[in-house]
Image (spheres, rainbow, N blue to C red):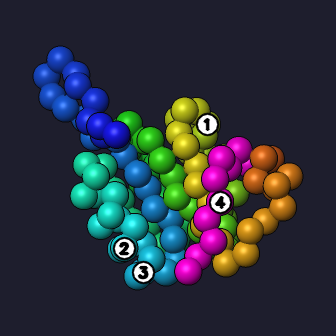
C-alpha cells in the first residue's frame, strides 16, 4: 500500500492519530505505522487528541482507545471533520456490534 499522496508541489503522507492511554501500545503502533510512511501523532487523552484532529490535515485513520473517557466525542469530531477517515477501535473487550456501528467504527482490535 503506497501511503503518499502526490500534490502539485509536495508529497503528503496520510495522517494517523493514535488516541490511547497506554504509552507502550501507543509507541509500538506509532513505530509500525511510521515505518509504512504514515505521519503519526500519539495522544494520551481526549483533549490532546481533539487538538490534534483540529490541527491535522489529511487525517486517514483514527485509532481510538474505547476505554478512554471521551472516546465517543473523538470519533464524532474526527468523522465530522474528515468524513472519509477510517476509525479503528482498540479495547480490552470488544463492544457490541451495535455500539460499533452507531459510532461508525469499522474495525475493533482487542488489546494484547
Mark 4 crowd level (few <14, some 14–19, many ≥20, 10 Å Cα): many
Dot 1 falls on a residue whose secondary structure is helix
| Residue 20 against residue 7 in the figure, above or below | below
The residue where tag 4 is placed is: 108
Read off the magenta span. 103-112
Q: CA distance from mark 2 to mark 4?
A: 17 Å
The picture quadrant where one finds residue 26 is: bottom left
The residue where tag 1 is placed is: 80
Q: CA distance from mark 2 to mark 1?
A: 28 Å
The residue where tag 2 is placed is: 28
**In this rendering, would 39 be left or right of 66?**
left
Dot 3 falls on a residue whose secondary structure is helix
Which circle, 3 or 2, is nearer the viewer?
2
Dot 4 falls on a residue whose secondary structure is strand
Checking the image for residue 23, the label placed there is 3
Which circle, 1 or 4, is nearer the viewer?
4
Q: What residue lies at 24% left-to-right and 58% top-to-bottom? A: 35
Q: Name the spot of residue 49 as percent of width and height, x first.
A: 48, 60
Specify whether residue 109 is painted magenta: yes
Mark 2 crowd level (few <14, some 14–19, many ≥20, 10 Å Cα): few
Which circle, 2 or 1, is nearer the viewer?
2
* The furthest residue to the top: 8
Amino acid at each position: 500500500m503506497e501511503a503518499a499522496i502526490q500534490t502539485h508541489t509536495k508529497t503528503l503522507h496520510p495522517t494517523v492519530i493514535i488516541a490511547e492511554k497506554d504509552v507502550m501500545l501507543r509507541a509500538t503502533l506509532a513505530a509500525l505505522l511510521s515505518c509504512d510512511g504514515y505521519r503519526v501523532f500519539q495522544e494520551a487523552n481526549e483533549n490532546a487528541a481533539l487538538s490534534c484532529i483540529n490541527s491535522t490535515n489529511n487525517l486517514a485513520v483514527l485509532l481510538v482507545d474505547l476505554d478512554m473517557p471521551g472516546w465517543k466525542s473523538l470519533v464524532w469530531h474526527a468523522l465530522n471533520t474528515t468524513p472519509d477517515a477510517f476509525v479503528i477501535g482498540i479495547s480490552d473487550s470488544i463492544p457490541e456490534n451495535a455500539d460499533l456501528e452507531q459510532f461508525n467504527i469499522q474495525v475493533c482490535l482487542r488489546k494484547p
